[in-house]
Amino acid sequence: MRLRLKEKNFITSCFIRYLFESDILRSQILKNATGITRFGLTKGRFEKLLLPIPPLAVQEEIVRVLDKFTELTTELTTELTTELTLRKKQYAYYRDALLTFEAEKRHPFVEKLLNGAKVEYGHKNKLCK
């Protein structure tokens, strides 16, 4: 959507962006939208939307706070994605190590668990009825 402001000194573009991402404005837009599969909002209906417009100083502070939250969320998402990737690799390593029973490849922990016991290998028909 493209929006051209008549007066430029009463609302900032960053504030408008966050406002359009908010549930408050989105619910108003959905109530006024028309269409079945693709929704549209006429200029007349758009002009009837009630937009909260605080003073510029307040808008700038709101934008500053939301920008900081966005930055922190992005940073945390990156860190968590990296951590998850590392945990998956760690899990795969230990899963494979704990399920490897050949003597020359056996993990010391598996050796300790077995405590000298022999591992038998069998076919599926031996294991299932």
Image (tube, helix red, strand yellow):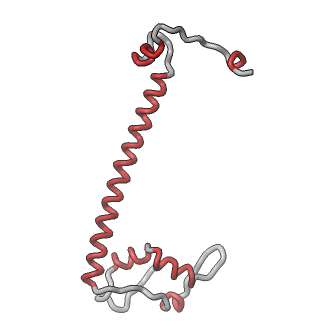
Residue 9 % position (x, y): 29, 88
Residue 15 % position (x, y): 34, 78
Q: 102 or 46, which is in the foreground?
A: 102
- Name the residue located 49 percent from the left edge and 77 percent from the top edge: 26
- Name the residue located 39 percent from the left edge and 16 percent from the top edge: 108
| Relative vertical location of residue 115 with respect to residue 88 in this rendering, above or below | above
Residue 86 % position (x, y): 38, 38
Residue 19 % position (x, y): 40, 77
Q: 114 or 30, which is in the foreground?
A: 114
In this view, the residue farthest toward the right is 129
- Name the residue located 37 percent from the left edge and 44 percent from the top edge: 82
Query: Image quarter for residue 13?
Result: bottom left
| Relative vertical location of residue 43 with respect to residue 95 in this rendering, above or below | below
| Relative vertical location of residue 74 with respect to residue 7 in this rendering, above or below | above
Query: Image quarter for residue 10?
Result: bottom left
The answer to whether residue 26 is left or right of residue 9 is right
